[in-house]
Image (tube, rainbow, N blue to C red):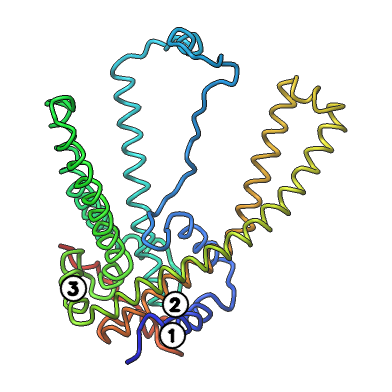
Amino acid sequence: MSWYAVESVDDAIDATRSFLLPVKIRAWLKLALITIFVGVGGGGGFSAASNLVTLPMNLPAEVTEEDVLLQIPAALPVEPWVAGAVVAFAVFVGLAVAILAETLRFVFYDALRTQTVRLREPARRRLGQAVWLFGFKLLVGIAFLAPFVVVGAVLWVVGVDAISDTWLFAGFVVAAGTVVAAGILYTLIIRGTDEFVVPLMVVSDCGVRDGWRQFWPVVRSQPLQFVVYIVVHFLLLLAIGIGQSIVGALVFGIVGTVGALVGLLVVLGVFGGFGAAIASTAGLVALAGIVLLTLLVAAIVYLPVSIVVLSYVITYEVSVLELAADDFALLAADGETDEGNKPTDGPASTPR
């Protein structure tokens, strides 16, 4: 018995090479945009660095409430409508970015299908499906969070002190097990949607519900294949992650060293020393600009690695899907041209 997850490891290498080579600058620039928003391994599309919040270093060893309040400047008066407008704008931007990420996910699958990277036409065709996909993920997240929110609200109203230690410990054990089980189930649903249902939506021009209706019978008929897939996929991402870390360290190390040398020349040649540079506004602006430019250059240099990784991982997932059911074939056959595998010109059918 052959395992689809194992066979697809090598098949995906050939398919990725065929998709990315020969290198075409315009195609790779479009892929770079897609890569910025689309993650691998069931990850979300758009990612940002977490903000680290720390207390001021000059706080005393024993911090009192009065000491902390002295460190916080008085809040500027803000009209309620201004605060509401800021929140509404932030929510709008977040929704727009999330839907854009889902749309670009469909665009990437269309590119694999046609072996030609386009942005505008596939994005217009797949926007409706992307909105439904985002809505589905949002509802799944709400469904998994709602019970915990309700339980937390009940505990807050009743009060933890009103519960005996025995029941509190038992509740904690049950809650911990439930959180783990719910987290695993949620991950499987989201990953199954991103890795298998979305390509089915592209092949069949259907919605999330119809995509799951097509995919679920395959899972039920071949459960061991997908169990092996989960294991192999995890090990594959682990190996890729280690390789990415090594390459990223080299790229950012080399570019960072060059940026540090440039910063040193600016500090010594223009301002006469580091103390003089940080003592002036112009010096601080120049140093901040060098740091930001260094990070930007390093990210751009590293971006082709991310493109290759994204292409390989998604191609691997699609290869497993094709081996599971011939009707789910999305990758273009060897030697097939874009015209021979081009999707219909009409709009995608109304997703459900």
First in residue order: circle 3 vs circle 1: 3
Q: Is residue 211 above or below residue 168?
A: below
**How busy is the neighbourhood of tag 2: few (under 14 within 10 Å), some, or many (20 plus)?**
many
Which residue is drawn at the image coordinates 51% and 14% (left, top)?
62
Q: CA distance from mark 2 to mark 3?
A: 28 Å
Q: Is residue 147 above or below residue 105?
A: above
Q: Are dots 2 and 1 in contact, CB under 8 Å?
A: yes
Is residue 317 among the parts visible in the rendering?
Answer: yes
Secondary structure of residue under mark 1: loop
Q: Residue furthest front?
A: 166
Q: Which residue is mark 1?
A: 337
Q: Which residue is mark 3?
A: 216
Residue 278: x and y in percent read 74, 24
Q: Which residue is mark 2?
A: 115
Q: Is residue 124 above or below residue 49?
A: below
- The quadrant holding residue 318 is bottom left
Residue 258: x and y in percent read 77, 48
Amino acid carrying mark 2 in the image: Gln
